[in-house]
Image: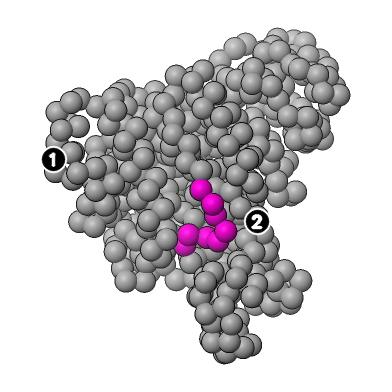
C-alpha cells in the first residue's frame, strides 16, 4: 500500500474538478481520489460528485485500469496458490442467487474459490445478505485463509476486512438512487476479484428491460471492457451474456433466496429449475476455464468419467456433494451446518396477491419487484420478501395465487400492499 502524501487531498479535489468537465485523469490523480475515499477523508458530497462524474462522462480504458489498480492498492489483498476460481454477476436481477450453488460445486470439484460477495445495492438482497441468513460473512483476512484452507471455498462480504474499501464507500453514495454506471460496475467487480487473487473468472452479464443493462449492444460493450481489463491483470475470463426478463428463482429477499438455493442443493421437488439450470451453466463454464490449466491427467479423467464439465457439475449437484460442501463452508463460517430448507421460514406477516381473472402472465417488472420487496423490509429484515407463485408464460386462473408478500412487521406489510397499484409486479 502506497504512503499518503500531504497534498493528496489537493490532487484529489483538482482531479474531481477535471473529471466533472470530462477530462482524462492519470494514475496519480485517480490514486489520490481512491486513497482519500478509502480513508474517509473526502466526505459524501465530494465522493458523490466523483461518482456522478463517472456516470455522466464515463472513463477511458486506461482510467478503468487505474481505478481498478488504485482500489486494490488502497486496501488489503489475498493470495492463494494455483488456480483460483471466481464468478460474479453484475446484479440488478432479484432472486437469482447462483453463488450459493456454484461456489460449493466448484469447491467440491477441488478448485479454490474464495468468493467475495456484495451486499444489496439495487436489489432486495445481495449475495452477502443472503449468505448471512446461513452463517457469518464478516471475517478477518486470517480467518478467510483458514476457511478456504479447510473447505476450498468461502462466501464472505468483501467489505469486512478493508478490501477495495473505496468501492464500499462509493456503493453507499450510489445506493439511494438505485443505480451504478456500467464503468463503476466493471471496476467494482474487477477490483475485488483481483484483490481476492482470482486467476480464472466467469462473469454473468444479464440484460433485459428492467435490469441494469437493457440492451444486447450495451452488454457486448461491457463484455469487451471486462475482457480488456482482465487481460491487463492477467486474469482468464469468460463473460456470459444472457437475456433476463424475470428472476431465476422464486424467492425475493434474503431468507427466501437462501431457501431457493437450498432447494436446489437438496434437489427438493420444490426447487426452481431455472435457478438450477443457470447455476449449472455458470459452474460448467467456470470449470472449463479452470480445466484449461489443469494437468492433462485431470482433463482425461473428466472427459472419460463425466463427458463434459457440465456433466461434472451436474454429477456434483445430483449426488449431494455440493450440498455437503456447502454445509462444510457454513460450519467454518460459524453457521449451523445442519440447516435445511424447511427451517428457512419467511416473515410471519404475509399476504397473498391473487388473480382477478384467467389470463397468461406476460411480464415480471423486476424494478417494481425490488421496490415492493424493499418496502416489505428487505434486506435489513432478513425474513422479508416476495415469493413468486407464478412466472412469465404461466396461465393464471381466477383467485389463484400470483405472489405472496412476507414481512417481519405489520406496518411494512400494509405499506407494501398499498404500494402495489403504483408499482405493479405482474403484467398480463
Given this view, does label 1 or label 2 mark the residue nearer the observer?
A: 1
Residue 217 location in percent, x, y? 63, 40
Rendered-image quadrant of the N terminus? top right
Magenta-colored span: 242-249
Q: Residue at the spot x=39%, y=29% of the render?
A: 200
Question: Which labelled disc corresponds to residue 304?
Answer: 1
Q: How much space separates mark 1 and mark 2, taking CA atoms?
A: 43 Å
Residue 53 seen in the figure: yes
Q: Earlier in the sequence, mark 1 or mark 2?
A: 2
Q: Is residue 10 above or below residue 71?
A: above
Residue 420 location in percent, x, y? 70, 74
Number of residues whose C-alpha sits closer than 10 Å to that of mark 1, classed few (under 14), some (14–19) or many (20 or more): few
Q: Residue at the spot x=32%, y=71% of the render?
A: 269
**Is residue 247 magenta-colored?**
yes
Q: Residue at the spot x=48%, y=67% of the render?
A: 250
Exactly how many numbered labels are in the figure?
2
Q: Disc 2 designates what residue?
A: 210
Q: Residue at the spot x=75%, y=35% of the render?
A: 55
Rendered-image quadrant of the C terminus? bottom right
Amino acid at each position: 500500500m502506497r504512503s499518503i502524501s500531504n497534498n493528496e487531498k489537493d490532487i484529489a479535489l483538482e482531479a474531481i474538478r477535471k473529471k466533472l468537465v470530462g477530462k482524462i485523469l492519470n494514475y496519480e490523480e485517480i490514486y489520490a481520489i481512491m486513497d482519500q475515499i478509502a480513508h474517509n477523508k473526502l466526505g459524501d458530497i465530494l465522493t458523490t460528485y466523483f461518482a456522478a462524474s463517472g456516470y455522466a462522462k464515463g472513463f477511458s480504458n486506461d482510467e478503468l485500469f487505474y481505478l481498478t489498480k488504485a482500489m486494490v492498492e488502497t486496501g488489503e489483498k489475498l493470495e492463494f496458490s494455483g488456480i483460483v476460481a471466481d464468478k460474479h454477476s453484475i446484479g440488478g436481477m432479484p432472486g437469482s442467487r447462483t453463488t450459493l450453488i456454484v461456489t460449493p460445486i466448484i469447491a467440491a470439484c477441488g478448485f479454490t474459490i474464495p468468493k467475495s460477495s456484495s451486499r444489496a445495492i439495487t436489489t432486495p438482497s445481495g449475495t452477502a445478505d443472503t449468505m448471512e441468513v446461513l452463517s457469518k460473512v464478516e471475517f478477518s483476512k486470517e480467518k478467510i485463509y483458514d476457511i478456504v484452507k479447510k473447505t476450498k471455498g468461502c462466501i464472505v462480504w468483501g467489505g469486512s476486512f478493508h478490501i477495495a474499501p473505496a468501492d464500499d464507500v462509493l456503493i453507499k453514495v450510489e445506493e439511494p438512487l438505485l443505480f451504478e454506471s456500467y464503468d463503476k460496475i466493471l471496476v467494482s467487480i474487477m477490483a475485488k476479484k483481483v484483490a481476492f487473487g482470482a486467476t480464472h473468472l466467469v462473469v454473468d452479464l444479464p440484460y433485459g428491460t428492467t435490469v441494469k443493462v437493457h440492451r444486447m449492444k450495451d452488454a457486448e460493450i461491457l463484455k469487451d471492457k471486462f475482457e480488456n481489463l482482465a487481460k491487463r491483470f492477467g486474469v482468464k475470463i469468460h463473460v456470459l451474456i444472457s437475456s433476463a426478463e424475470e428472476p431465476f428463482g422464486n424467492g425475493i429477499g434474503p431468507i427466501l433466496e437462501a431457501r431457493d438455493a437450498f432447494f436446489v442443493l437438496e434437489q427438493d421437488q420444490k426447487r426452481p429449475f431455472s435457478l438450477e439450470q443457470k447455476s449449472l451453466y455458470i459452474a460448467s463454464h467456470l470449470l472449463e476455464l479452470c480445466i484449461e490449466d489443469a494437468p492433462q491427467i485431470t482433463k482425461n479423467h473428466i472427459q472419460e468419467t463425466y463427458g463434459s464439465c457440465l456433466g461434472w457439475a451436474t454429477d456434483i449437484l445430483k449426488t449431494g456433494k455440493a450440498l455437503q460442501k456447502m454445509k462444510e463452508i457454513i460450519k467454518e463460517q460459524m453457521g449451523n451446518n445442519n440447516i435445511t430448507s424447511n427451517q428457512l421460514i419467511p416473515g410471519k406477516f404475509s399476504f397473498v396477491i391473487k388473480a382477478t381473472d384467467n389470463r397468461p402472465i406476460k411480464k415480471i417488472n423486476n424494478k417494481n419487484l425490488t421496490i415492493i420487496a424493499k418496502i416489505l423490509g428487505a434486506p435489513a429484515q432478513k425474513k422479508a420478501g416476495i415469493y413468486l407463485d407464478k412466472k412469465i408464460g404461466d396461465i393464471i386462473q381466477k383467485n389463484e395465487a400470483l405472489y405472496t408478500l412476507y414481512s417481519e412487521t405489520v406496518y411494512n406489510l400494509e405499506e407494501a400492499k398499498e404500494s402495489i397499484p403504483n408499482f405493479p409486479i405482474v403484467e398480463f
